[in-house]
Amino acid sequence: MWYRYWLHHINADRVAQVLSIPLFLLLWQWVSASGVVSSRLFPPPTEVISAFGRWYDSGQFWGDVQVSLTRVGIGFFFGSVIGILVGILTGRVRLAANLLSPIFGLLRPIPPIAFVPLVILWFGLSETGKYFLVFWGVFFVVWMSAHHGVRKVDPLYIRVAQCLGTPRSKMLTNILLPGAIPYIIVGLRTAVSISFYTLVAAEIAGTFSGIFYRIDVSQQNMQIGQAMAGLLVLGVISLIADRLFYYLSRRVDWSAS
Amino acid sequence: MKEKLQTKGHITADSVSIVFDSVGKRNVAVDDASVDIQPGEFVCILGPSGCGKSTLLNAIAGFVQPTQGELTLDGRTIKSPGPDRGMVFQQHSLLPWKTVLQNVAFGPLMNNTGQREADSVARTFLNLVGLGAFESHYPRQLSGGMQQRVGIARALANYPNVLLMDEPFGALDAQTRAIMQENLLNIWEEFKTTVVFVTHDIDEAVFLSDRVVVMSASPGTIIADIKIDLPRPRDALIVTSPEFLDLKRQCLDIIREETTKAFALQNAS
């Protein structure tokens, strides 16, 4: 038969991967339309798409995305820069590690969302409070990766540098920091996802725009389709950010083959 | 430059003992070792694994301090590592985030040489080890033998008075190792730096050196100092000559005697 040849060359893994999302959408559509669940509370994908269209046409969509990305961006930037600097400090200076590690150990497990009530008191409705929450989520994980990273640099590299006459003042930038890069990158990538989790906490209260704010408002107005569209947008943006970071980090991560 | 280098690189070890204290257990790595290495001399330290030969080398490099006795380089006590002693490590010592050229230029750069000058020095030494064409490769893209050649170029790029080599060819296959040994001798003939070369391979020690210093295990003591008066330049064929075999037998006899003694001691205890 003529199609035997094609059947033989079709990769079953690939087919399953390509069909995955369409099948999911079909199932969703079917469940929603079948009346098993209330289609008002659980609208089908078609309704979610048209809700997204209304959101987009209202002119609020790009504004929401921009506001949310700014919060994530600024919080992530300061959280990572300060996290790396403090991590290097505690990783290399024993006194700093002994002083700071217990404090960080105490503060780190507090979920950022638990800070929301206080943040509103401290910072009011200003953006600073939002940046602070994202910063809080990002800082600890980046600090830990830098702290362990500079400690785990192969001692052989330090010997090599000493042998070649590297002064102590140049050891940090030439050996410790590049040596810790693979660890720091893992921390930063985790922090990218965390910054989107904390964005949700930041937009729970005290704001008038943003992707999660839109989800929250839609829920109150029973616009479930738009709330679901908001969730998907959040998922897609977070995914793009993760992929983008991965792609960019490969340029500086010498341990990536 | 040749003249200058030949007068420098004089190493002396005067009753050097190195003791490590680990969890209440005293471990004597080097016991009362004395040796005098002349400028421009090629000396191999030969001994079984764990005999303290690498520890002695690390002490000359300045990574560990003698517990007793004194180590000097050109009359001055060795206190810390420095660019006057280039070191070639066993393996995987190239900085993986730097290219081949950056690895070799790193030493000069750290010693206040400008980038352009450092790169030019690095290219000179890369050409010397025959890897000029690989300057923009990363270490992981090179074979083990090529990595060690870069390691030698890197150590030489600081124009050290002493070259310290810690079993640099130990991880290479036999054919590559033989070629590397010949290359190393050619380079040494050109620069006449003092070389202290640690190995457990008798053929390698006899083939390369002016003198073989034999160490025995636990505690690490120097048990023989054998002059190798084979003519230079040497090539690979010399290993079949009666003189070579005779010297090799001398080393073997001493090592076998020591090993038997050590085994007898272990059985008795």
Image: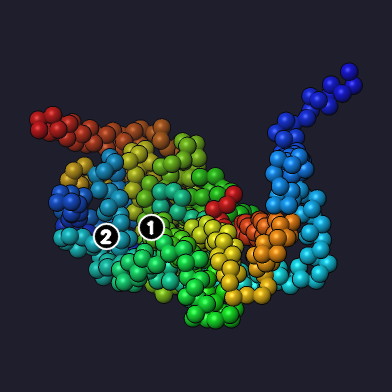
Classify mark 2: helix, strand or loop. loop
Q: How crowded is mark 1: few (under 14 residues within 10 Å), some or many (20 or more)?
A: few
Cβ–Cβ below 8 Å for labels 1 and 2?
A: no
Real-space CA distance between mark 1 and mark 2, rounded to the nearest whole angstrom: 14 Å
Work out whether residue A139 can be spotted. Answer: no
- Which residue appears at 32% of the width and 66% of the height? A102
Q: At label 2, which amino acid type do we have? A: Val
- Which residue appears at 31% of the width and 36% of the height? B248
Classify mark 1: helix, strand or loop. helix
Q: Which chain carries label 2?
A: B
- Image-quadrant location for residue A151: bottom left
- Image-quadrant location for residue A131: bottom right
Have a look at marks 1 and 2 and say if they share a chain.
no
Rendered image: mark on residue A155:
1
Q: Position of residue B264 (x, y in %)?
A: 13, 30
Q: Which chain carries label 1?
A: A
Q: Position of residue B105 (x, y in %)?
A: 53, 65
